[in-house]
Image (cartoon, rainbow, N blue to C red):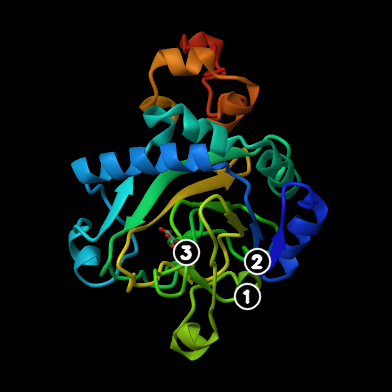
Amino acid sequence: MRSFTDRTADPDTIAEELLSGAGAVRITGLIDDDQIAEARSIVMAESDRDPGKVTHFQGEAEETGRIELQRRVWNLLAKGEVFSRMAAHPVLMRVLRRFLGSEFIMGSIAANRILPGGPGQEPHIDYPYWDFHEPGTHPMRLNGSFPMNAQVSVILDPFTEESGATAYVPGSQRHLRYPGPEDEFHEKCARMTGAPGDVVLFYGATWHCAMPNRSARDRSAILIQYLPKWVKPMEDLPAGLPASFVDAADDDIRQLIGLNFPYPEVLDQAAGGNTVGRG
Ligand SMILES: O=C(O)CCC(=O)C(=O)O
């Protein structure tokens, strides 16, 4: 995987690598130690209180949606200002404006904590492609030649092969389908390794999954989903936030939570609809 720093993270180069290269890049040392420590302590406290609903995990988790060795914390914007700073980091904003269009939005911001002994996930592709098990529910001839997703993993604990760093198959974003047994995901995969404060940015059409944590410590990351402005977001972010948050939000955060793009709207004044919109 190609590695960049905040100084070398050129938007055109990274966008090209996501779309036509490996599908993933690392930006080292993007988030400072204080922010990582603050985010991690919130994630640990929240996920100790409530393991959250998990997705894509193997075995028991898939059946129940909840088990103790992997935990999700959803709606992070409401849980600490540090998460807004991460989501709207200027380097990420610059790259994502190039990749997804200048008015891109955020579809979800959640933590994924895998405890020692926690299982991995099934190889998958991310929202809005994650139900591509049923391609017929999407438009015909949809393909991955332009992006409808970008994923950011902000690494909170060392991501190593042993701790279950995300596995991915470089170049698989070009297929826009789920991998089958013939694709030999586990034989061909590379790993999104990194240190706390590093960020991995990838195109969610790339086959990937969390791997089992065989280390003696937690393996947590903040997972941020970004989408073009017209893709329906996965989390209803404004609904999960107090009015005071929305009132105080700066321009980037307003864009990220979808307030710049008002549709759907009631456009028929005669119907008496509220056409003020969400902005
Ligand atoms: O935490 C990880 O390693 C990846 C998580 C992921 O791909 C997902 O939950 O969709």
Please name the residue that numbered disc 1 is placed on.
Answer: 170
The three-letter amino acid code for the residue at tag 2 is Gly
- Can you tell me which quadrant of the image ligand 1 is in? bottom left
On residue 159, the disc is 3
Q: Which of 141 and 224 is in front in this view?
A: 224
Which numbered disc, 3 or 2, marks the residue that appears first in the sequence? 2
Name the residue at 34% across, 64% down. Answer: 56
Name the residue at 63% across, 66% down. Answer: 141
Label 1 close to label 3 by CB (< 8 Å): no
Give above or below for 129 relative to 235: below
Q: Which of marks 1 and 3 is in front?
A: 3
Circle 3: element type: loop
Please name the residue that numbered disc 2 is placed on.
Answer: 23
User: Where residue 230 appears, x then y in whole percent?
Assistant: 60, 39
Give above or below for 50 relative to 153: above
For the residues labelled 2 and 1, the Cα–Cα distance comes to 6 Å
The answer to whether mark 3 is within 8 Å of ligand 1 is yes
